[in-house]
Protein backbone atom coordinates (compact mmCIF):
# COMPACT_ATOMS: atom_id res chain seq x y z
CA UNK A 1 0.00 0.00 0.00
CA UNK A 2 1.37 3.39 -0.94
CA UNK A 3 1.68 6.26 1.49
CA UNK A 4 -0.87 8.26 -0.54
CA UNK A 5 -3.46 5.46 -0.33
CA UNK A 6 -2.87 5.11 3.40
CA UNK A 7 -3.27 8.88 3.92
CA UNK A 8 -6.50 8.85 1.90
CA UNK A 9 -7.92 5.97 3.98
CA UNK A 10 -6.97 7.71 7.24
CA UNK A 11 -8.48 11.04 6.18
CA UNK A 12 -11.75 9.38 5.05
CA UNK A 13 -12.01 7.54 8.38
CA UNK A 14 -11.30 10.76 10.30
CA UNK A 15 -13.95 12.73 8.38
CA UNK A 16 -16.43 9.88 8.83
CA UNK A 17 -15.86 9.81 12.59
CA UNK A 18 -16.37 13.55 13.08
CA UNK A 19 -19.28 13.82 10.64
CA UNK A 20 -21.30 11.77 13.16
CA UNK A 21 -21.06 14.67 15.59
CA UNK A 22 -22.01 17.29 13.01
CA UNK A 23 -25.14 15.51 11.75
CA UNK A 24 -26.40 14.54 15.19
CA UNK A 25 -28.45 16.76 17.44
CA UNK A 26 -26.23 18.30 20.05
CA UNK A 27 -27.04 18.76 23.72
CA UNK A 28 -29.32 21.66 24.68
CA UNK A 29 -27.83 24.90 25.99
CA UNK A 30 -29.89 24.59 29.20
CA UNK A 31 -30.96 21.30 30.75
CA UNK A 32 -32.13 19.90 34.07
CA UNK A 33 -30.84 16.65 35.51
CA UNK A 34 -30.78 15.20 39.04
CA UNK A 35 -32.55 18.32 40.33
CA UNK A 36 -29.86 20.70 39.01
CA UNK A 37 -29.81 23.19 36.17
CA UNK A 38 -26.92 22.98 33.71
CA UNK A 39 -25.95 25.79 31.34
CA UNK A 40 -23.72 25.24 28.33
CA UNK A 41 -20.55 27.32 28.61
CA UNK A 42 -18.46 25.91 25.74
CA UNK A 43 -18.90 23.26 23.07
CA UNK A 44 -15.84 22.10 21.17
CA UNK A 45 -15.21 19.46 18.55
CA UNK A 46 -14.51 16.79 21.20
CA UNK A 47 -15.88 18.07 24.51
CA UNK A 48 -18.23 20.34 26.47
CA UNK A 49 -18.21 22.55 29.54
CA UNK A 50 -21.50 22.95 31.43
CA UNK A 51 -22.00 25.11 34.52
CA UNK A 52 -23.99 23.34 37.21
CA UNK A 53 -25.89 25.71 39.48
CA UNK A 54 -25.47 23.89 42.79
CA UNK A 55 -26.91 26.61 45.02
CA UNK A 56 -27.65 30.29 44.46
CA UNK A 57 -24.01 31.18 45.17
CA UNK A 58 -22.16 27.94 44.27
CA UNK A 59 -21.42 26.62 40.79
CA UNK A 60 -19.51 23.64 39.49
CA UNK A 61 -18.10 23.29 36.00
CA UNK A 62 -18.56 19.90 34.39
CA UNK A 63 -16.19 19.04 31.56
CA UNK A 64 -16.80 15.94 29.49
CA UNK A 65 -15.93 14.24 26.25
CA UNK A 66 -18.47 13.99 23.46
CA UNK A 67 -19.77 10.43 23.58
CA UNK A 68 -22.39 8.92 21.33
CA UNK A 69 -25.10 6.62 22.66
CA UNK A 70 -25.98 3.88 20.18
CA UNK A 71 -29.48 3.71 18.73
CA UNK A 72 -31.81 1.72 20.96
CA UNK A 73 -35.43 0.81 21.53
CA UNK A 74 -37.21 1.68 24.78
CA UNK A 75 -40.74 0.41 25.34
CA UNK A 76 -41.14 -0.11 21.60
CA UNK A 77 -39.95 3.41 20.73
CA UNK A 78 -36.85 3.82 18.55
CA UNK A 79 -34.27 6.10 20.13
CA UNK A 80 -31.74 7.39 17.58
CA UNK A 81 -28.02 7.72 18.27
CA UNK A 82 -27.39 10.87 20.28
CA UNK A 83 -24.70 12.72 22.21
CA UNK A 84 -24.73 11.64 25.86
CA UNK A 85 -24.74 13.81 28.94
CA UNK A 86 -22.65 12.01 31.58
CA UNK A 87 -24.18 10.12 34.49
CA UNK A 88 -22.73 9.94 37.98
CA UNK A 89 -20.77 6.77 37.12
CA UNK A 90 -18.95 8.54 34.24
CA UNK A 91 -17.09 11.05 36.40
CA UNK A 92 -13.38 10.32 36.63
CA UNK A 93 -13.56 8.31 33.40
CA UNK A 94 -14.72 10.70 30.66
CA UNK A 95 -16.27 13.49 32.73
CA UNK A 96 -14.81 15.77 35.42
CA UNK A 97 -16.21 18.38 37.81
CA UNK A 98 -14.38 21.53 38.93
CA UNK A 99 -15.20 24.48 41.20
CA UNK A 100 -12.80 26.78 39.39
CA UNK A 101 -13.76 27.83 35.81
CA UNK A 102 -10.09 28.27 34.84
CA UNK A 103 -9.30 24.68 35.84
CA UNK A 104 -12.34 23.49 33.87
CA UNK A 105 -11.14 25.43 30.82
CA UNK A 106 -7.70 23.85 31.15
CA UNK A 107 -9.22 20.33 31.15
CA UNK A 108 -11.45 21.30 28.20
CA UNK A 109 -8.40 22.40 26.20
CA UNK A 110 -6.59 19.19 27.14
CA UNK A 111 -9.50 17.15 25.74
CA UNK A 112 -9.79 19.30 22.62
CA UNK A 113 -6.07 18.92 21.89
CA UNK A 114 -5.95 15.19 22.61
CA UNK A 115 -5.14 13.21 19.49
CA UNK A 116 -7.37 10.39 18.34
CA UNK A 117 -6.31 7.07 19.84
CA UNK A 118 -8.77 4.88 17.94
Image (spheres, grey):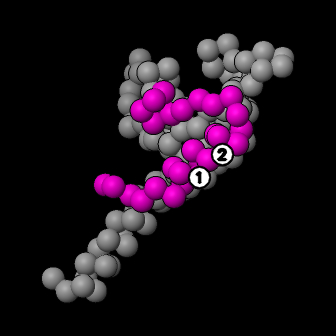
Quarter of the figure with the N terminus: bottom left
Residue drawn at x 77%, y 20% as measured from the top left: 58
The relative height of residue 56 versus residue 52 in the rendered view (above or below) is above
Q: Which mark is residue 109?
A: 1
Residue drawn at x 38%, y 27% as measured from the top left: 73
State whether residue 30 appears in this view: yes
Q: Is residue 117 left or right of residue 91?
A: left
Q: Position of residue 15 (x, y in %)?
A: 43, 66
**Residue 72 lies within the magenta run:** no
Q: Is residue 32 left or right of residue 94?
A: right
- How dense is the environment of label 1, judged by Cα within 10 Å: few (below 14), some, or many (20 and up)? some
Residue that protrudes farthest toward the right in the picture: 56
Residue drawn at x 59%, y 29% as measured from the top left: 97
Q: Position of residue 24 (x, y in %)?
A: 53, 48
Q: Which of these two is toward me, 13 or 91?
A: 91
Quarter of the figure with the C terminus: bottom left
Residue that numbered label 2 is attached to: 105
Query: Considering the numbered disc 2 on the image, is that residue within a helix, a strand or a loop?
Result: helix
The relative height of residue 6 versus residue 35 in the rendered view (above or below) is below
Q: Which residues are magenta?
A: 91-118
Q: Quadrant of residue 33?
A: top right
Q: Are marks 2 and 1 in contact (CB under 8 Å)?
A: yes
Amino acid sequence: MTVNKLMLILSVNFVSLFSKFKTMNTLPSILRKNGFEYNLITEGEKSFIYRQLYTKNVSYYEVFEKRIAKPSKIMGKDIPAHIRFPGNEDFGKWAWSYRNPETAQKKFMELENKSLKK
